[in-house]
Every structure is written in structure tokens, then in C-alpha cells.
Amino acid sequence: MRNRYIAIFLSLLLVAMVGIAAKPGGIAHMTSLWIGDKTDTADTTPGGNDLFVSGTAEFDGLVRLDGGFTAASVTRDLRFDLGSATVDSGNDVDDGSAPNLTTVDNVPAIVWDDSSEVAGVQWGFRVPSDYSTGMTFYAIVSSDDASGAATKLDWGLVANTDDGGFGSVTAQDLVACTSATLDASNEVLTLTPDATGAALFVAGSWITVEVFNASTNDDDLELKGFSATYTATH
């Protein structure tokens, strides 16, 4: 009898897959499927040796069986080239700008010479069409001195949308370094938007992210890389 149930199930599955292939967009919807005797009148659990699939099964690069079998979330990356940044109220970042683009410890870096040099650098990007949640930025930094917690990176966000008014800066909480050996090792700072900042990220919107030196010492702040991650819809 069990072999008979398996044969019936495979036949139904084949029919469902054919329907998926024939349906534009590759999406099929299935309500309830029973194999065997439906002995549970409440329609909540299978009876005996029955196979029961409830709710909807969606086929769009994944299969979901009523929450019992789900596709894992997907994390994607965004990279921001240092040389593509612009100086706030200025032009592109180069060897003559302040901050300037140079080479530090054998790698490219944007360098603020001391705490008096505070102009921000900016990147603009379009929020990806597969964006779901969780946009987080990362900055790898160092210094010409041991520095420590007095070395700080501040930042903000600007959002612009189609047919919307010009965006204004949404300030975010600055991030202070914790390393006491920034002249000998790098530190990766995590820049997580607050609730107001996170609300700016809507698929299709244009975001400008700006970082600037907020240090309270006279040491250099060396930005050696900048990137972001987000959770995609699929």
C-alpha cells in the first residue's frame, strides 16, 4: 500500500512540475494535497500514514511548504571604490584634495591628516532591486599613531527618489575605534543605520553615504576600504 502512495505522489508531483514549466514566470500555486485517507476532519494534521501538504507551494527559484521548508536568506555585497568618492562641497578625491587619496601601508587609502581635517567623502548608489533589509556598512581604518578610542568616524545618509524633493542628510551615530595599535594594525568599523536611516533604504531609491573624520586627536585617519552588505529577497 505504501508503494502505491509513493507512486501516486510521484505522479502528482510530475503533473505539478509540468504545470510550473508551462506557467509564465515559473510560478505555481498549490493549496492542499492529500495522499491516502484524509482522516483528520479539522484539516490541520495528516491521519495515519497520509502525506499532507497545506497552504501554498511557490516555485520561483525556491520551494516553500507552509513554512516547513524554506530557502535561506541571501546576503549580498556592495563595494565602493576609494577613487570614485567625492569630497563634500568639493570635487573628486585625489592626491591634492583634503582628505587626499594616497598609498598607506602598501594599499590605497583616503587620509585625513589630523583632527582639523573633517571634510566628508561621499558615494552614491541605487538601492538594489532585490533589497529586502539590513543594509550595513563597513570601513577598514588605521592611523599613523597608536591612537585608540579618540579616532572616530562619523557618517550620514541622504535619500533621493523619483519625483521626490531633494533629500537632506540623516545623521547617524559616529563610530569610535577600540584598537590601541592603529599604527600597526587595521580595525574594521561597522556602521549600522538607526531606525530612521534604515527606513531610507527602499528598492529603487538613490542613496548617498558620507563618512568624515570626527577624531579628537591629532593623528591621521586612514580609510583603506569601504563596503556594505544587505539581505536580498532571493
Image (cartoon, grey):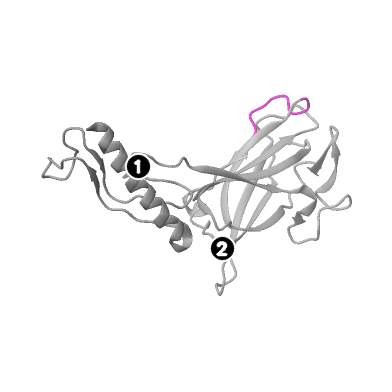
Which element carries disc 2, helix, strand or loop? loop
Q: Residue at x 69, y 40 (%)?
A: 215
Front position in the image: 34 or 176:
34
Query: Which span of residues is magenta-colored?
Result: 176-184
Considering depth in this image, is 49 or 89 the residue closer to the camera?
Answer: 49
Is residue 188 visible in this depiction of the protein? yes
Q: Quadrant of residue 110?
A: top right
The amino acid sitting under disc 2 is Gly
Question: Label 2 crowding class (10 Å Cα cut-off): few <14, some 14-19, many 20+?
Answer: some
Residue 204 - label: 2
170 vs 44, left or right, is right
Can you give x and y, in whole percent of width and height, for residue 4 in the image? 26, 37
Q: Residue at x 60, y 70 (%)?
A: 166
Q: Position of residue 102 (x, y in %)?
A: 86, 43
Q: Quadrant of residue 5?
A: top left
Q: Residue furthest bottom?
A: 163
Q: Secondary structure at mark 1?
A: helix
Q: Give the residue at mark 1.
A: 10
Tell me the amino acid under the disc marked 1. Answer: Leu
